[in-house]
Image: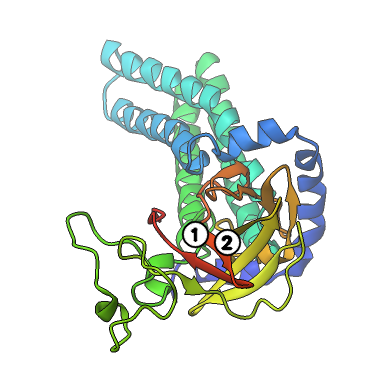
Amino acid sequence: MPVFSALDRVAATPSLDSVIAWAERPLAGLPRAVRDGLHGVWLGHPLHPALAQAPIGLWTSAAVLDLLAATRPPGDSRDQAEDAAGVLIALGLAAAPLAAASGATDWSRLDRPRQRVGLVHAALNTAGIALSVASLVSRRRGRSGLARALSLAGAGASGLAAGVGGHLSYRHAAGANHAPDVPAELPAGAVDLPAGTAPSSPASSGDPSGEDPRGELDGGVPWTAVSGVTELQELRPARGLLGDLPVAVVVREGRVHVLADSCSHLGGPLSEGHLEDGCLVCPWHGSAFRLEDGSVRHGPATAAQPALEARMRNGIVEARLLTLTPR
């Protein structure tokens, strides 16, 4: 049985939900600007994985020095290794609060199954911090043997916590970009051409007659009709299909905007969201994307939402992708 398979059972355990509700309550009161900063909106990438490297690396290095000290006879060499280990533990404790704050902020905007696994991650990290504090206290009291043991235990707990965090990211896709791979899902010819490629002729756009049935090509990129949009109202998002790609269609100040429908944070339906200050807000966790280009204005999302150029022609919404959104 895989080592981390127990975490899949944790994800399906609703008995943890009361603890989760209690723990996430104070995080909901953080100012939006603080949450955005801790999510990593300004970075364009989740901030927590980067911040977590510092305490884990420092505590692991301290554990190595403590192991080295244990192999040395009493004397200056052992004392120097233990002193250096103590400095590294203290530095790790100084770096831990910001890493924990960013992780907790991300965790507060996950769904329940992911939050349950995240609770295990947080508990192990808390144990690692407590053991590191105890090691530092024992070191200052001259109990070097106990300090080394606590240092190793703390590094082990933090390492296990990192493993659970990796499971949360790779198995449960927390922090991953959940927006669709738009170029792969658009109809043939509805994306821009690679640099250096000549624009396609009308005949190469899929119409054997040599005529462009969807309107002018405008440099080789045809417009494609968005289907399934029965009625459009100003400032009310609607769901449509561009080929096989679900899209959210919005009319604002007479201009039509089209974004991929699945939110980059956790795949929420943007077409069921609302508009706020020129942004489309996800109904699940409140990520806000600018209508103009899909960039993130507010988290928890950190990856931009794929946006398409759009127009209204003869009462039909048409769209095309001129700029490939990086995944």
Query: Judging from the image, what secondary structure is the residue with disc 1 in?
Result: strand
* Quarter of the rendering occupied by the C terminus: bottom left
> By what rule are the colours in the image chosen?
rainbow
- Percent position of residue 118, x then y: 61, 54
Distance between the Cα atoms at labels 2 and 1? 6 Å
The residue positioned 43% from the left and 17% from the top of the image is 87
Give the residue at x 72% y 42%.
Answer: 277
The x, y position of residue 257, in whole percent, is 60, 58
Apparent side of residue 91 relative to residue 262 in the rendered image (left or right):
left
Percent x, y for residue 204? 25, 78
Q: Which label's residue is closer to the chain start, 2 or 1?
A: 2
Q: In this view, does 41 lie above or below 258?
A: above
Q: Which residue lies furthest to the bottom in this view?
A: 208
**Front in this rendered view, residue 260 or 262:** 260
SS class of the residue under badge 2?
strand
From this viewpoint, is residue 127 visible?
no
**Please, what is the three-letter code of the amino acid marked with disc 2?**
Val
Residue occupying image coordinates x 65% and y 50% = 287
**Which labelled disc corresponds to residue 258?**
2
Q: Please say if 164 is above or below 35.
A: below
Residue 260 placed where, x, y %? Answer: 55, 64
**For residue 35, side relative to residue 80 (left or right):** right
Q: Give the numbered dot on residue 226.
A: none
Q: Quadrant of the N terminus?
A: bottom left
Inspect this view and state whether residue 166 appears. Answer: yes
| 305 horizontally vs 273: left or right | left
Q: Residues within 10 Å of mark 2 (few under 14, many from 20)?
A: many
Q: Do the residues labelled 2 and 1 touch (CB within 8 Å)?
A: yes
Of the numbered discs in the image, which one, if any, rests on residue 308?
1
Q: Name the side, left or right, on which 17 lies relative to 271.
A: right
| Residue lying at 17% horizontally and 55% vertically, measured from the top left | 196
